[in-house]
């Protein structure tokens, strides 16, 4: 717009100059210098006024255009900010919920931490008490026997039913022995289980802090377990009581770690024990073994029940024959009774009722006498139907 105004002023100035020249040629008496100055002043005044007007109009137009674009941009910005504001509100709500949940979880965690600290303290106290108690041979033996009893009950081998506690006897060489448990097997055999495991060295290893001392105590623990294996193998429990028995004895170790640490320290111990017919069993291994024995008892009971069922079936079959014999006699008796009854009816009808019906004619009695009916239904004779395989 400003450029158009300036161009118009320039055209006007050129027109004035041409008009001035034309006037100069027409009126030669006028002073050329004065005329030029006046014309220049007029041109400058017109140009300045036109420039001011053009600049003012251009500024007003620019401001109007800028205001329109600002309003449009503000509207676009408002449209863009509306979803953002909704999302911000949703985020604020979510953050509030998370803060509330965090406070609740924090309280629960603190409560759990306090409870866990208390439980850990109780466990530490119990562990210390158990460790001190296990240092006593009597308490250690009672604890091992209790662990053994728990495993046996878990396997379904109830006390005094499938096993005997503290059974004693002598083998063929006269060496006596007293296993902790003698488990009876379905075929009349017995399986000896011993749980007297030395644990003093292992407890010393648990209380030691120096790794070298821990390893030394574990070596003593493995050596003590090996010595107990040798002593147990010499008793030959499978030769006692002159009964059949698996030619091995089970050495029950009442803790998984007791056996694992010993086998880690003395690697050949397991192989040597099996060669001496001593089966090293942790609670898990003994449970699996006793489950197998319990399964054998179940199958033996099923087989025994099957024999009882067969005997009962044979007895029932014999008794059923006798019942059928009596049933036949009863049926034949009923048939004879029905035939005799019908013969009696014929005799009454043909001989007795003929005479009785004459009394009304003689003035004695007025009602007619009904004739009794014969029985047409006869007892059914039992029939034996052969089966499809007969």
Image (tube, grey):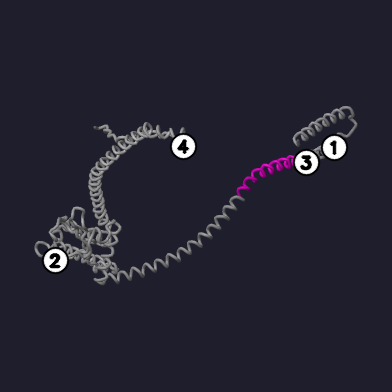
Where the C terminus falls, by quadrant? top left
Q: Earlier in the sequence, mark 3 or mark 1?
A: 1
Locate residue 297, reporting x and y percent. Answer: 24, 52
> Label 2: which residue?
176
Marks 3 and 1 in Cβ contact (< 8 Å) = no
Instruction: Give me the disc on residue 42.
Output: 1
Q: CA distance from mark 2 to mark 3?
A: 125 Å
302 is higher (above) or lower (below) than 254: above
Left or right: where 32 falls relative to 325: right
Q: CA distance from mark 3 to mark 1?
A: 27 Å
Q: Which element is circle 2 on?
A: strand
Locate residue 33, reporting x and y percent. Answer: 85, 36
Dominant secondary structure (helix, strand or loop) of the stretch shown in magenta: helix
Labels 4, 1: front one: 4
Left or right: where 174 falls relative to 330: left
Q: CA distance from mark 2 to mark 4?
A: 110 Å
């Amino acid at each position: 717009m400003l450029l158009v105004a300036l161009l118009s002023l320039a055209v006007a100035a050129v027109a004035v100059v041409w008009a001035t020249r034309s006037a100069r040629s027409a009126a030669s008496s006028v002073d050329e210098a004065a005329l030029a100055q006046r014309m220049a002043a007029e041109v400058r005044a017109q140009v300045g006024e036109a420039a001011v007007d053009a600049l003012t109009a251009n500024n007003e137009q620019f401001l109007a255009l800028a205001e329109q674009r600002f309003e449009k941009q503000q509207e676009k910005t408002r449209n863009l900010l509306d979803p953002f504001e909704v999302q911000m509100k949703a985020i604020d709500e979510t953050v509030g919920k998370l803060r509330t949940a965090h406070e609740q979880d924090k309280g629960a965690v603190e409560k759990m931490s306090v409870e866990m600290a208390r439980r850990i303290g109780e466990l530490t106290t119990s562990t210390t008490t158990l460790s001190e108690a296990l240092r006593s041979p009597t308490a250690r033996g009672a604890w091992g026997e209790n662990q053994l009893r728990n495993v046996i009950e878990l396997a379904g081998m109830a006390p005094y039913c499938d096993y005997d506690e503290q059974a004693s006897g002598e083998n063929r060489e006269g060496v006596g022995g007293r296993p902790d448990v003698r488990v009876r097997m379905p075929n009349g055999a017995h399986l000896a289980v011993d749980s007297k495991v030395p644990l003093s060295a292992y407890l010393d290893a648990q209380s030691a802090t120096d790794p070298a001392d821990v390893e030394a105590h574990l070596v003593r623990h493995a050596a003590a377990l090996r010595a107990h294996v040798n002593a147990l193998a010499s008793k030959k429990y499978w030769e006692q009581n002159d009964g059949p028995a698996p030619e091995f004895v089970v050495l029950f170790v009442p803790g998984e770690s007791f056996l694992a640490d010993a086998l880690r320290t003395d690697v050949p111990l397991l192989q040597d024990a099996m060669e001496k017919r001593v089966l090293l069993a942790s609670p898990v291994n003994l449970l699996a073994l006793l489950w197998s024995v319990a399964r054998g008892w179940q199958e033996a009971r099923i087989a025994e029940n099957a024999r009882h069922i067969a005997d009962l079936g044979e007895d029932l079959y014999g008794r059923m024959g006798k019942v059928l014999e009596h049933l036949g006699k009863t049926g034949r008796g009923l048939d004879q009774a029905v035939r005799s009854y019908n013969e009696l009816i014929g005799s009454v009808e043909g001989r007795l009722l003929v005479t009785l019906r004459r009394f009304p004619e003689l003035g004695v009695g007025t009602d007619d006498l009904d004739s009794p009916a014969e029985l047409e239904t006869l007892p059914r004779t039992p029939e034996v139907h052969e089966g499809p395989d007969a």
